Image (tube, rainbow, N blue to C red):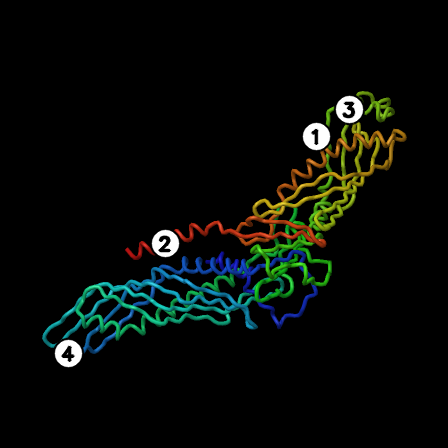
Amino acid sequence: MEKAICFMVFSFLLLPANTLVESHQEGYISGVLSEKGLDFAKDLLIEKAVSSMVPLHLPDIEKSVKIPLIGKVHLGLSDIVIYSVDFPSSSVETGDSGIVLIASGATANLRMKWKYSYKNWVITISDHGTATVEVLGMEVGLNAAIINEEGTLKLLLLEHGCHVKDISINVDGGASWLYQGIIDAFQGKIVSSVEDAIAKNIQKGITKLDAKLQSIPKQLHVNSVVALNVTFMDDPLLTNSSVELEINGLFNGANEISVSNYYRKRSHNFLSGNGLAKMVEISLHEKVFESATSVYFNGDYMHWTVDEIPESLMNTDGWRNIIPQLYEKYPDDDMNLHMTVTSPPIIQVADHDINTAIYADLIFKVLNSDEVVPVACVSLVINASCSAEIHRNNLAGSIRLIDFTASLAWSNIGDLHMQLVQAEISTILKTFFMPYLNLHLRDGFPLPVPHGFTLQNAEIIQLDSRVIVHSDLSYADRHDLLTRYQFISSGLNA
């Protein structure tokens, strides 16, 4: 049940906390759960709650009653078990005090054992058997809120309860007077036991979940280098058809805690929860991607030895007609080409496109008598276009070269014919640099989707500095969940 409630929390159990002071910090990843998503979350929560609830054991009940023409009889019910529950109708509503979830018209089935004993000064009579109970017209509801305490969610159960309209008791065996005696003695107690047991089950689940929420880490580790800051920011926005919440969303070093230094006013018009055809919308500001590249740059990970290029370019002989003086000074020597990014790449999300500018140095090195000799450096400005795609729950992508400029930064072998050099650098970029970047971009990074859920039929658009993902959701264990519940119900009813 915890996974389902967690999803509901991230989905719609979100209430602005009037007692909190506005932090003026913004999240760079925003999520919206649409009306369609709310219905999905509600139905899944009920399925999970029912599956975790049954079998639900109720306490034994005993009572002495006076039966006409017989006298005082001691009655007892034991092994009382709710083995199935069905909620045909449910709704979720937002209000000033939080979220109200109501399941109405529910039915439940119980089985139990009965016994009685009657004793007078002459004889003692006793008997036992089984009985079944059908609960009719049951309503279950809860009113919950969640507040943001220093970037962590705290769940508050404001109100909850269960009301049973009527029950139908079927006694197997026993005399006719016994049936009426059980109804008279236990109908009210059975009703109150069912109501109390379900209400306590709700409270127990909320208490466990609140502890679970407190343990949610504020960082989502992508790998050993980088982590995503998933601290919750400010107050969620709650409407009658959607819910929006924001997390910090910036990347930092895997062993660091980072606080956003950016500030921007919350924008209310870029999310489309009203009328959204998909269940969820996840929006990532371009600064999310810039923060990732900054971590890798500052961690000194953006430099490579160029080796996956035509073999002719790995020897000075291959450059004889392009840089003659290189071959004259170092004839038939092997070479190394080393590429270093000189500043964090600039990423700009435009309408329908993601533009990237990469500033890098390409250093030519010669292997001469077991000595590595840097001989020249060409500065590059690489303009590329990126496209985003979804791989399961990861936002991945690919990059393609648009154009680049090259200029000589320094040289120990005299001036270079840059037009000729640039043609060979184009080959290097296309055969080594772009494939290398694509190899890593295709893995992507995980989107903040609750565990157990998978994005389905996702669509991506680029708009106004943001990459926006529209998607439905599937729950991997949903089929197993229903199968387990049916197995338990049929087994207990056998």
- Label 3 is placed on what type of residue? Asn
Kindly report the distance in space between the C-alpha atoms of the residues bearing marks 1 and 3: 14 Å
Return the disc, 3 or 2, that comes first in the chain's sequence: 3
| Disc sitting over residue 315 in the figure | 3
| Disc sitting over residue 486 in the figure | 2
| Disc sitting over residue 412 in the figure | none
On the image, numbered disc 1 is attached to which residue? 308
Q: Are marks 1 and 3 in contact (CB under 8 Å)?
A: no
Return the disc, 1 or 4, that comes first in the chain's sequence: 4
| Spot occupied by residue 29 in the image (x, y as percentages of width and height) | 65, 56
Kindly report the distance in space between the C-alpha atoms of the residues bearing marks 3 and 2: 71 Å
Q: Is residue 55 above or below residue 414?
A: below
Q: Residues within 10 Å of mark 2 (few under 14, many from 20)?
A: some
Return the disc, 1 or 3, that comes first in the chain's sequence: 1
Q: Nearer the viewer, residue 487 or 272?
A: 272
Q: Are marks 2 and 1 in contact (CB under 8 Å)?
A: no
Locate residue 110: give its quadrant: bottom left
Return the disc, 2 or 1, that comes first in the chain's sequence: 1
Return the disc, 3 or 4, that comes first in the chain's sequence: 4
- Label 1 is placed on what type of residue? Glu
| Spot occupied by residue 283 in the image (x, y as percentages of width and height) | 65, 55
Q: Is residue 181 above or below residue 330?
A: below
User: Which marked residue is nearer to the observer: mark 2 or mark 1?
Assistant: 2
Residue under the point 60% across and 70% down: 17
Kindly report the distance in space between the C-alpha atoms of the residues bearing marks 3 and 4: 114 Å
- Label 2 is placed on what type of residue? Gln
In which quadrant of the rendered image does the C terminus lie? bottom left
On the image, numbered disc 4 is attached to which residue? 69
Kindly report the distance in space between the C-alpha atoms of the residues bearing marks 1 and 4: 101 Å
